Image (spheres, rainbow, N blue to C red):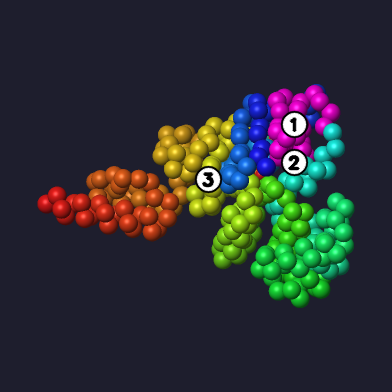
Amino acid sequence: MGIKLQQVSYAYSMGTPFEKYALFDVDLTIPHGTYQAIIGHTGSGKSTILQHFNGLLKPSKGQVHIGDRVIAAGKKAKELKPVRQKVGIVFQFPEHQLFEETVLKDIMFGPMNFGVSEQEAEQRARELIHLVGLPEDTLNKSPFDLSGGQMRRVAIAGVLAMDPEVIVLDEPTAGLDPRGQKEIMDMFHALHKERGLTTILVTHSMEDAARYADKIAIMHEGRCVLNGTPLEVFADAETLEKYRLELPHIVRFQRKIEKLMNKSLSKICLTEEELAAEVAQALREGRDAQ
Ligand SMILES: Nc1ncnc2c1ncn2[C@@H]1O[C@H](COP(=O)(O)OP(=O)(O)OP(=O)(O)O)[C@@H](O)[C@H]1O
């Protein structure tokens, strides 16, 4: 399922003296099966845009297409339950929303609330607990006896239990140690590939955007100022500089090497392996030319 924003503007407290526009004429098309990162500084509108992806917020102007459903300014949004089931949002610190006495009940809560049978919901929970990297006996524990990282995984299993077609991740690794961060990001990437999910990652991390995303959109003061593949975005040094966004570590390293070699490599590299191969190639060419 894809998502498309057409000329979307959004004002908080519309029509009151506190009216404040947080989005201005945003056009963004996220085709089915894409891994889209949305990056921007604090206050650029990331959380506001995210809440449009499943109808939590309705645009003040413009239209949001979620699959074949259209949510438009000025129109009453009909029954949004199916949209909420198809678009799962992993909010920041999702473990704060755990509340049941056991992990099993917590994971089953969402699907059962949406009419899935108890048997089916339990089966999903038993499958998902492995998928999020926890042993099956976790299901019988209280979520509040788990570590922070384990609680995060349980909360993620709860979102996946709804069997969404689109998954929206709002800084999903905030507060985790580097190893936990990588494990969670790799897990979402594997899910994205295996289940053909449309994945939207809202992040401050250029590293994660570079490593996982097919497309990177840059938000600045409520506008989407750039959207392209990682290579297109990292080649646009002028725009990145204008909006004070850092290149990922690996690209900065490449720039340093190029400066020392006084030579540009033939492409921008996003992994250590690619960079090593490009440098080796450039050295070979240098030797052959002597
Ligand atoms: N409930 C609200 N009422 C009024 N203004 C708000 C509200 N929520 C956000 N804003 C304003 O809207 C703008 C965009 O905020 P938003 O939270 O979408 O940005 P963000 O990029 O998600 O920031 P962060 O990275 O800090 O989460 C900011 O100027 C913010 O102050």
Q: Residue at x 19, y 51 (%)?
A: 286
Q: Residue at x 87, y 59 (%)?
A: 117
Q: Are marks 3 and 2 in contact (CB under 8 Å)?
A: no
Q: Residue at x 58, y 36 (%)?
A: 219
For marks 2 and 1, the one nearer the N-term is: 2
Taking 283 as reference, is 275 left or right?
Answer: right
Q: Residue at x 84, y 68 (%)?
A: 102
Q: CA distance from mark 2 to mark 1?
A: 11 Å
The residue carrying pointer 3 sits among few (fewer than 14), some (14 to 19) or many (20 or more) residues within 10 Å by Cα, namely some
Q: Quadrant of ligand 1?
A: top right
To which residue does mark 2 refer? 54
To which residue does mark 3 refer? 214
Which mark's residue is nearer the viewer, 2 or 1? 1
- Where is residue 156? Give x, y as percent: 71, 58
Which region of the structure is painted magenta?
51-77
Q: CA distance from mark 1 to mark 3?
A: 25 Å
Provide the secondary structure element on which disc 3 rests: loop
Three-letter code, disc 2: Asn
The disc label shown at residue 121, or none: none
- Where is residue 90? Give x, y as percent: 71, 52
Three-letter code, disc 3: Asp
Residue 1's quadrant in the figure? top right
- Where is residue 112? Give x, y as percent: 86, 56
Q: Residue furthest left?
A: 290
- Where is residue 197? Give x, y as percent: 64, 50
